[in-house]
Amino acid sequence: MTKPVFRFAPSPNGRLHLGHAYSALLNADFARRFDGRLLLRIEDIDTTRCRPAFEAAIYEDLAWLGLRWEEPVRRQSEHFDEYRAAFRRLQGRGAVYPCFCSRKDIAAAIACREAEGGQPWPRDPDGAPLYPGTCRLLPAGEAERRIAAGEPHAWRLTMAELQTLWPGPYSYGRFDRDGLEERVAADPWRWGDAAIVRKDTPTSYHLSVVVDDALQGVTHVVRGQDLEAATDLHVLLQTLLGLPTPLYHHHGLVLDPEGDKLAKSRQSQSLAELRAAGAAPQDIRQRLGF
Ligand code: GLU
């Protein structure tokens, strides 16, 4: 029987904190208990925010925690061609359209709709307003002309059409700490016309994660609850691209004393700082319940 494959997939855009340590240790714990393999993937598609020094620090912090992973490590920034090929397949299915809107354009269109409709515009599971569909209505000729002229653009999923052509129902398998599995319904439509190729990078988190999990033969995805809703979108992409859907476990998040999610942007204490303050790997493991 082939072994289960787990992966820890951090982004090198800051130092790792306790939340990352929890996710990494939980992946390693599952891999050990399920007699599986553990991969490490560097999710660095955002070339403006990711830094080689942060990547080096990831290896250092994880090794310090006592983790081992298979080499070579997959670095997403080296695989833009593969994401482009997946995007072409989506394009071939008529599943996408180009979008030239800036954030400001989107905000203005939504303010306008809210004023007209007298009610708040619907939001996606992350709390961002759904894309109002402005560029979906562009005549094909105009979109082609603007692309040919080199105008920066994203590519969005055409959800209304997809919902007709690929109605589902969608679902995926969820597993718990003991490996018990159950089916969970997925609702990709609540994401609206999500961008699957961003303006600033030739892919998106959603597209590259789905392509990589399939290419790397990942069978068990263990990641934070903050990504649970994104799984619904991933299941749709897997279906459109003909890729297998792994099993998922979305773990609770490590919170700070105020009850907020730890975040690089909130300057949450990093593993490096905890180490400098005298913490030992064993202290971190204990604190996180391992
Ligand atoms: N790169 C993502 C993060 O650092 C995790 C992606 C995933 O596990 O699917 O939050």
Image (cartoon, rainbow, N blue to C red):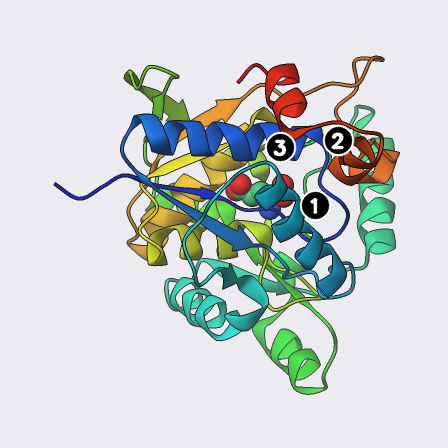
User: Where residue 206 sits in the image (x, y, percent)?
Assistant: 53, 49
Quarter of the figure that contains the N terminus: top left
Is 150 left or right of 144, judged from the image as shown?
right
- Residue 17 versus residue 53 in the image, above or below: above
Identity of the residue drawn at 35% across and 31% down = 32
Q: Residues within 10 Å of mark 1 (few under 14, many from 20)?
A: some
Foreground residue among 213 and 23:
23
Residue carrying label 1: 132
Is 192 left or right of 56, judged from the image as shown?
left
User: Where residue 290 sits in the image (x, y, percent)?
Assistant: 53, 18
Foreground residue among 147 and 71:
71
User: Where residue 58 sits in the image (x, y, percent)?
Assistant: 65, 49
Residue carrying label 3: 21
Residue 16 bears which disc, if any?
none
> Is label 2 in contact with label 1 (beta carbons under 8 Å)?
yes
Q: Secondary structure at mark 1?
A: loop
Q: Amino acid at mark 2?
A: Trp
- Residue 166 versus residue 77 in the image, above or below: above
Q: CA distance from mark 2 to mark 1?
A: 9 Å
Residue 257 visible in the current orientation: yes
